[in-house]
Amino acid sequence: MAEAPDEVAQPGSGSRLSGTDRMTAFSDGVFAIVITLLVLDLRVPEYHEGELLAGLRGEGASYLAFVVSFVYIGVLWLNHHALLKLIRATTLTLSWINLAVLFGAVIIPFPTAVLSSAFTHGDIADQRAGVTLYALAAALMSAPWLVFFGYLHHHPELLDRGVSPEHVRTQRLRPITGLVLYGLSGLLGWFVNPVLGLIGIIVMIAYHAATSEGLRRRGRRR
């Protein structure tokens, strides 16, 4: 991928183009820290002699929440990596949008800890709240991705060679799907059953994993 010079005036505007190396390095560092922080919520359970296995089973929800969020952040990193491959340069505005994308990622350890606590120590009401919070965080995370794709569609000069604005426009379907279906998963978890809501979240993570390289337009190649 060709890099833009460190600072280049954008023709016809007051904006300046910058290379993407610093954005990529900073973003990768953030994802690495966030995915590492998840393990801090895993603790050795309290147990009496001979009851360690039972204690570990009692923490099963914590381990599941950790695995789900570890995979989720990994999928986000893969999606973000594919996103940055679309561009050859960035602007100050796009860098701020990227910070919003990263903000959505760094909050994931909190709803993960809440979800873990709700299913380990809480009742059905706590589980509903935990699943709904996690789904809400995931839904809100989709919003800056939508803005990112929208900005690129209207600024094709930032796109890498061979990437068309039409391809970028097609990708907006993915965060829209996230906003809607993560939101529905939260409603399902609150009004119907928290386990069903959690399943909906896992299905959406799988969807984003399967489409991490982007959606293809029918009859067109990128």
Image (cartoon, rainbow, N blue to C red):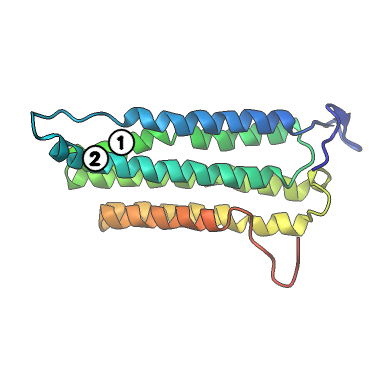
Left or right: 72 in relation to 62? right
Residue 23: image location, x then y, percent: 68, 31
Residue drawn where x is 71% and y is 45% of the image: 85
Residue drawn where x is 46% and y is 52% of the image: 205
Secondary element at image label 2: helix
Secondary element at image label 1: helix
Residues under labels 2 and 1: Cα distance? 6 Å
Q: Which quarter of the rendered picture does the N terminus lie within?
A: top right
On the image, numbered disc 2 is attached to which residue?
118
Res. 114 mark: 1
**As shown in the figure, which amino acid type bears the numbered disc 2?**
Ala
Residue 110: image location, x then y, percent: 38, 32
Q: Which quarter of the rendered picture does the C terminus lie within?
A: bottom right
Looking at the rendering, which quadrant does residue 93 occupy? top right
Label 2 crowd (10 A; few <14 / some 14-19 / many >=20) = many
Viewer-closest of 24 and 187:
24
**As shown in the figure, which amino acid type bears the numbered disc 1?**
Val
